[in-house]
Amino acid sequence: MDTKKNKTDAFNHLWSANSDWTQVAEQGGPTFIVEGDGVRVKDLEGNEWVDVNGGYSSVNIGYGRKEVAEAMYKQMQELPYFPQGSTSIPAIKLAKKLSDITPGDLNRSWFSSGGSEANETAIKIARAYHKRQGESSRYKIISRRGSYHGATGGVLWAGSGDRSDYEPASYPGMLYAPHPDPYRCELGGDTPSECAVLCSDAVEKLIQFHGESSIAAIIAEPIAGASGTAVPGDEYWPNLRKICDKYGVLLIADEIVCGFGRTGEMFAVNHWDVVPDILCVAKGITSSYSPLGATIVRDKIADVFKGKDNIFVHTLTFGGHPVSAAAALANIEIIENENLVDNSKAMGSYLLQNLNQMQKQRRMIGNVRGKGLLASIELVSDRNTRTHFNPEMRLGPRLSEKFKSRKMILNPPVPYINLQPQLCSKKSDIDFIVSNIDEVLQEIENEVY
Ligand SMILES: Cc1ncc(COP(=O)(O)O)c(C=O)c1O
């Protein structure tokens, strides 16, 4: 395979996520990954890399599982797609499986192609649900500052992120609540519990301020993996459930990252025995072997769309694709048979223990936190003031470069170094990741202090 030709073609034609092709070219062009096994991948030149965050925190079972490829190939040969108005056996089996493994009466799945679509679908269902119930004034959606729920038109306006290119706001009625981040509690809570109570109270106050009759739903990640893995105090999720019940607001759990074992439970809401009204999944549902998202809905919500006059009019061509559904079934079988949820819990504790040790040596580590294999380091220039490093230091690219020289694919969204490795990770993999991060941080400390 001709690396030079591939690089020229990439420079001329490819528009990759969050990157600029001129800068990529100046840095030697993109890395072409051609194969993978477990936590490791190989590039076109034969170099081996540890893919620390397994794709986009999404290759839960690890690379190279032939069982998934075979299930997809078999399905592809039998039936690659389905005629309008029909469905496929893998989609039905998957809907049943999701009903079995999700908590409570989350029994009905609407399939899409990924996380953004799953969340868009959830928001549409929430709004349509209230309309069908005769409460058409309920259209506002609460999300939390600092969270991420996708890149498409509607969910782009949930949570935070730079939206300046797309102003004016395209989605009316988006409200923002504080993020229950115990290390930086916006409301001054000193402990995870205090922060959780203050932040859930703030949701209630927001509902009261706007009037409960205007609020359709709250969307939240159980643990915000996309923004520094702030693990909320144990009161937060049960409180959200109570508040939603009290005011008739739907609770949407975005488990796009957290789902399928990532946090040491099959679904992160299980840590607090909370059943959301809608649970959204993607990424880990197929371990990214094929694109798929699902919006899983409780019976009492879904039943409102029963009957020919109540249909939820919403179509996505690739939703419930049979080949993706076959991949998901094979993937979930691997997660279950190989106890990867338990491994996530055990390796997550080991990782956290090591990060806590590292924090004692490295003054630029302000905080470490995590649950299962969803962990983060928060970097600070001064531990006492918890001040972040000046962006002019270009800490992110400097760290990425140093990780790259150690054959690790890890591009930290500074101030965080997010660590979300594959659920099949072994102790030796965690040791490799931790010792290299420690060395890199030591080098940076020598350069900056
Ligand atoms: C919490 C969360 N929700 C939604 C999304 C969007 O998923 P997708 O990129 O599959 O559209 C992401 C993607 O990273 C995410 O982290």
Image (cartoon, rainbow, N blue to C red):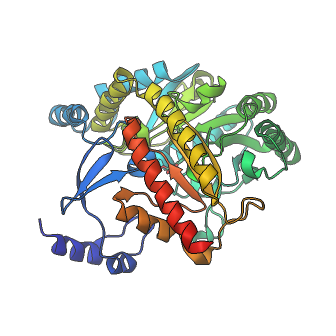
Q: Choose between 181 and 92: the one closer to the eye.
A: 181
Q: Choose between 394 and 287: the one closer to the eye.
A: 394
Residue 16, compared with residue 131, is above or below; it is below
From the top left corner, tell me how far across and down residue 129 is, in percent: 64, 34
Please identify the quadrant where the N terminus is shown.
bottom left
Please identify the quadrant where the C terminus is shown.
bottom right
Q: Residue at coordinates 81% horizontally, 28% vertically from top-left? A: 246
Residue 118 as seen in the image, left or right of residue 239: left
Rendering quarter of residue 91: top left
Residue 376, compared with residue 263, is above or below; it is below
Query: Does residue 198 appear in this view?
Result: yes
Residue 387, compared with residue 252, is above or below; it is below
Q: Residue at coordinates 38% horizontally, 26% vertically from top-left? A: 94
From the top left corner, tell me how far across and down residue 313 is, in percent: 50, 40
Please tell me how many numbered marks the rendered image carries: 0
Residue 370 as seen in the image, left or right of residue 53: right
Q: Choose between 386 and 336: the one closer to the eye.
A: 386
From the top left corner, tell me how far across and down residue 349 is, in percent: 54, 34
Q: Which residue ends up furthest to the left in the rendered image?
A: 1
Residue 445 as seen in the image, left or right of residue 218: left
Q: Choose between 161 and 168: the one closer to the eye.
A: 161
From the top left corner, tell me how far across and down residue 252 is, in percent: 63, 37
Q: Residue at coordinates 49% horizontally, 29% vertically from top-left? A: 346
Query: Does residue 112 appear in this view?
Result: no
